[in-house]
Image (cartoon, rainbow, N blue to C red):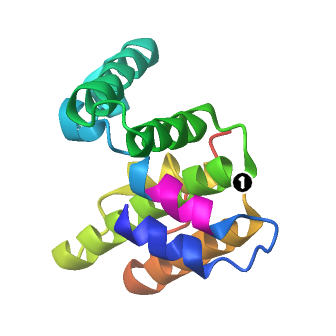
């Protein structure tokens, strides 16, 4: 989330509320602190994942932070991210996808092998924001230079 917050500050998109993007980046994975990072490979249906994460946020906001004004702000930001109805929430989701691919490239560099194609296939092709698409393209080009690996196919 820290890298996503910094990337939020790097955007040249003047239509976005950058401060809101930073805050969305910080809170977007809060529920994972309680339920863990539930990946599709875990076989947990989306509805169940959503329920578990909603319960975790409720616990965080109402039991740990006693529904304080700050807690309510965190809850509203988390819900905004989850609902993806604002340009900022959609941008931050794209940053999440880009950040996952960036992590994959870091792991591949450490292993000196390109072995994480599924991470690219489930992230880069789904990025919608033009600037983040460019960042994704640059990342795939860097991977190509390092490993001679082709760019991911678009599964859409």
* The quadrant where residue 53 appears: top left
Q: Residue 32 versus residue 112: which sits nearer the camera?
A: 32
Identify which residue is drawn at 37% across, 13% down: 48
Relative height, residue 40 to residue 8 (above, below): above
The location of residue 109, given as percent across then percent down, is 26, 78
Identify which residue is drawn at 72% across, 60% down: 129
The location of residue 52, given as percent across then percent down, is 31, 19
Identify which residue is drawn at 62% across, 72% down: 137
In the picture, the quarter occupied by the N terminus is bottom left
In the picture, the quarter occupied by the C terminus is top right
Relative height, residue 92 to residue 45 (above, below): below
In the shown orientation, is residue 95 left or right of residue 35? right
The location of residue 99, given as percent across then percent down, is 44, 63
Q: Residue 149 versus residue 21: which sits nearer the camera?
A: 21
In the shown orientation, is residue 44 left or right of residue 123? left
Q: Is residue 153 visible to the viewer in this orientation of the structure?
A: no
Relative height, residue 4 to residue 128 (above, below): below
Relative height, residue 21 to residue 83 (above, below): below
Find the magenta span and give its range. Answer: 19-25
The question of residue 24 being in magenta is answered with yes
Residue labelled with disc 1: 128
Element carrying mark 1: loop
Identify which residue is drawn at 32% across, 34% down: 39
Q: Residue 14 versus residue 104: which sits nearer the camera?
A: 14
The location of residue 83, given as percent across then percent down, is 62, 32
Q: Is residue 93 visible to the viewer in this orientation of the structure?
A: yes
Q: Residue furthest bottom?
A: 145
């Amino acid at each position: 989330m820290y890298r996503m917050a910094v990337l939020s500050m790097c955007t040249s998109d003047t239509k976005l509320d950058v401060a809101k993007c930073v805050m969305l980046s910080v809170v977007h994975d809060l529920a994972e602190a309680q339920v863990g990072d539930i990946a599709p490979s875990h076989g947990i249906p989306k509805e169940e994942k959503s329920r578990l994460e909603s319960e975790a946020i409720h616990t965080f906001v109402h039991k740990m932070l006693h529904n304080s004004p700050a807690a309510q702000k965190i809850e509203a930001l988390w819900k905004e991210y989850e609902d993806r109805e604002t340009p900022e929430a959609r941008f931050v989701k794209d940053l999440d996808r880009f950040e996952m691919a960036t992590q994959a490239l870091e792991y591949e560099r450490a292993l000196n092998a390109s072995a994480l194609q599924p991470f690219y296939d489930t992230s880069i092709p789904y990025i919608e924001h033009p600037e983040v698409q460019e960042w994704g393209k640059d990342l795939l080009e860097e991977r190509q230079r390092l490993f001679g690996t082709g760019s991911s196919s678009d599964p859409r």
